[in-house]
Image: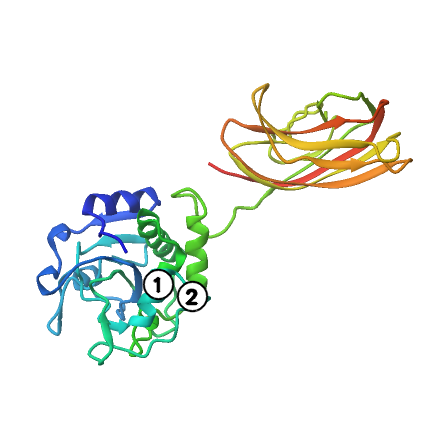
Amino acid sequence: MATPLTAPRLVAALKAEGCAVHEVGGWRTNNRNHKGPWGPVHGVMIHHTVTGPGTDVVELIYHGHSALPGPLATGCITKDGVVHLTGNGRANHAGGGDGDVLNAVIGESYGTYPPATHEHDGSAGAVDGNARFYGWECENKGDGKDPWPREQYLAMVKATAAVCRAHGWGHKSAIGHLEWSDWKVDPRGFDMAGFRRDVADALALPAGRWEGEDPMPQYVNLGVAGEYELAPGAWDSIEFTTEWTDETGHHATGGSVFARGPARFSGTVSLQIDGLPTGAVVQARMSEYAGDEHRADHPIHEITGTGGGSFVVLPLTKRLASGRSMRVRLLSQAPVPVTVANAVLTVLVWKET
């Protein structure tokens, strides 16, 4: 349950999410509030417009038509990916729907799909959706064949995520019209479960970051040119003296840094420790630096001696903030010096902006 966003807050939320926003003249006072309540609001509803070439679809959603006065939605998302704001308040888009669906949306308590709807506008058990949902009318013929251009679909996800983020809602606060009314089939051409997964991905990142798919990761493969002695009792960064591949350009040969933020990375470092007495321990961890200043440590992994060579493969997975760099550090707790016989780091790095 939430108080509807003001017009300035809605615009700010959309722009923060990376949407191209067009404010249609007069949209801030264009509503159907004289016909019933607007709010409390609980979610966002997705529609298709059932229009083809030659239709001034934004004009239609703003003014409506003889059988249904406008606005017909909060906004119209056209095939070029522009979010045209057409109404601020109650709009004729949802109509009557199923109270069980509304309760599932309010609680975000359903699985892949909300419960099946058994109501529609005018049915005995229907509840008013126009008071409770923002609506995006999305330009499409609605025949299941008309494509959804990438820029339009991205805008639909981002616009939905913007409203959800502004209210503190999760992805299950987004539903399709067909999930609300058993008379409706929209949106056609994509599955709402997949759409919600994309909204969830957008919400998992800072506003404006999601682009529908990760960019190609960059490959980093580093090692040590030769074995070296690890003295007991002090944390020591691994100096990766061999650089087989570094597509990010973030490691200099002979340096200990393997990734610099802002970035995400996932991979492993394989270690061989010789001379580690049986039961003795070498600890390993990732550590964050700002320049040469140590800033943060991550959970410790332990390598336990087996009497000869001791081997371990450690996971390296993290999101790294801007201005931070990551190193791998070792601490020997053995009573005698041990030898780092080999260290091979392999990670994929997704650079962020």
- The residue indicated by pointer 1 is 105
The one nearer the camera, 120 or 186, is 120
| Number of other residues with Cα within 10 Å of mark 1, as a class: few under 14, some 14 to 19, many 20 or more | many
Please state, as top left, top right, bottom left or bottom right, where the N terminus lies in the image. bottom left
Above or below, 220 relative to 255: below
Q: Are marks 2 and 1 in contact (CB under 8 Å)?
A: yes
Residue farthest to the left, as pictured? 34
Q: Secondary structure at mark 1?
A: helix
For residue 20, above or below residue 333: below
Question: What residue does disc 2 label?
Answer: 110
Q: Residue type at mark 2?
A: Tyr
**Quarter holding residue 310:** top right
Sequence-wise, which precedes: disc 2 or disc 1? 1
The crowding category of the residue bearing disc 2, from other C-alpha atoms within 10 Å (few below 14, some 14 to 19, many at least 20), is: few
Give me the residue at 79% from left, 32% from top: 281
Q: Residue 264: image x %, image y %?
A: 55, 40
Question: Where residue 216 sits: x, y (%)?
Answer: 56, 46
Amino acid type shown at disc 1: Val
**Viewed as shown, does residue 344 lie left or right of 310?**
left
Q: What percent of the width, then of the height, locates residue 156?
A: 35, 56
Residue at x 60% of width, y 34% of height = 248
The residue shown at (68%, 23%) is: 255
* Residue 14 in the figure: left or right of residue 205: left
